[in-house]
Image: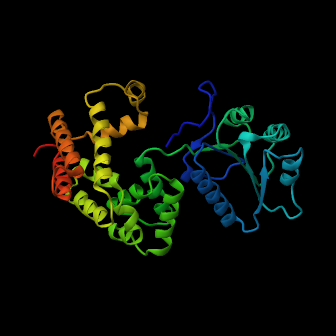
Amino acid sequence: MAARAAGASARTKVAIPQLAWHAVRPAPIVLVSGAEDVLAERAIGMLRDFLRSEDPALEVSDLDADGYRRGELLTLASPSLFGEPRLIRVSGVEKSSDDFLLDALEYLEQPADATTLVLRHRSGVRGKKLLDAIRAGGGGGIEIVCAELKKDAEKQDFVVAEFRAEGRKIAPGALRALVGAFSDDLRELAAASRQLLSDAPGDITEAVVARYYGGRVETNSFAVADAAIAGRHGEALIALRHALDSGADPVPMVAAFAMKLRTMAKVSGSRGSGGQLASSLGMAPWQVDRARRDLAGWTDAGLGVAIETLAQTDAAVKGAERDPVFALERLVGVIAARGRR
C-alpha cells in the first residue's frame, strides 16, 4: 500500500519504496518517518528481530542525533574483526546536530557493508536535506511511513496486522469492541492487543474481549451509538444495558448520540471531498469521511425522525419521563431502524 511521506515536500521526487510499518524489510538505510511512535517502535522492533533471526551475532547500537558528535556514526559502522552484521538505530533525527547531518550525508555516499542504518524522523523541516537525499535514492534506502492513525478503520487495520503477524485472528465484533474501548490511545490499544495475544488462546471473540476488558467496553457511550447507527440493534441494546449496569449516566450517553447525529446531519446532502467540506463545515476531513460512512442506508426523512426522537430522549433522561432507560432503549430502536419506525 502506497503511503504519503510525512513532512515531504510536494516537489521532492521520491525514488525509494515507501512502505507501511508492518511491511518493513532490511535495507542499507531505513528512514522511519511520521508522528506515530507506536508504529515506528513496532517497525523498528520487527526489523531488529528479523535481522537477529538471520544472524544471532547481530550488533545493535543506538545514537541520539540531537547530542551527536562528529565521527560517532562512522566509528560504529566500521568493519569489526569478525565481520558481524550491524544495526545502528538513530533517534531524534528531527532534532539533528549539524555534526550528525554532515556525517549522515557523507555516509549515504558509501554505506557500510552488512550494516542497516535506521533513522527515526518524527516531523518538521530539520534534516530536510538529509531526508530529500534519502528519498531521492541516496544510499539505496527505503522509507517506513508511520503517520498518525486518526480513523477507527485505520486503528482496526493496525490491530488486524498485530494479530496476523502472530498467525492469529480476531472476530469483527471483537475488533470493533476492542478499538472502541481504546480508540483514544494507540499505545493502550497496542498493549491490549498484545495482552490478548499473550494470554488468550485461539482466535479472539467478542466474549474474550468482554472477559478481559468488559468494563472498558461497556462504558463506552460511542460504542453504543456506533452500533445503533450501523443498524446492529441487538448489539447496541446489549452494549447499552452493560453500560447502564456498570454505572454509566444516561445523559452523556444521549450526548454521544447527539454528537454523531449532528455530524451526520451536517454532512447529509453535501458534495465534495472531505478536505473540501471540512473548512466550510467546521470539521476535520476524517470526521466528514466518517459521517458519510455512517449515513449509508439512511434517508433524509429517517434522519429527521431520529433527531426528533433524540430530542424527546434528551428531555426524558433529564426528568420529563419516569423511565429514562426505556427512553434510551426506544432511541436505540429508532436509530437502529434508521428512523423507519
**172 or 264, which lies in front?**
264
Residue 110: name its quadrant: top right
Q: In this rendering, is residue 269 above or below 166?
A: above
* 102 to the left or right of 122: right
Question: Residue at (60%, 54%) from the top-left corner?
Answer: 43
Q: Position of residue 253 (x, y in %)?
A: 30, 52
**67 or 44, which lies in front?**
67
**239 or 21, which lies in front?**
239
**Render colour scheme:** rainbow
* 213 to the left or right of 187: left
Which residue lies most toward the front here? 319
Can residue 298 be seen from the camera position used here?
Answer: no
Residue 245: name its quadrant: bottom left
* 303 to the left or right of 116: left
Can residue 221 be seen from the camera position used here?
Answer: yes
Q: Position of residue 293 (x, y in %)?
A: 31, 40
Question: Residue at (50%, 72%) from the top-left corner?
Answer: 198
**148 or 218, which lies in front?**
218
* 302 to the left or right of 219: left
Which residue lies most toward the left here? 341
Q: Position of residue 279 (x, y in %)?
A: 42, 26
Question: Residue at (84%, 46%) from the top-left corner?
Answer: 68
Question: Residue at (28%, 55%) from the top-left corner?
Answer: 250
Q: In this rendering, is residue 58 above or below 6?
A: below
- Numbered disc total: 0
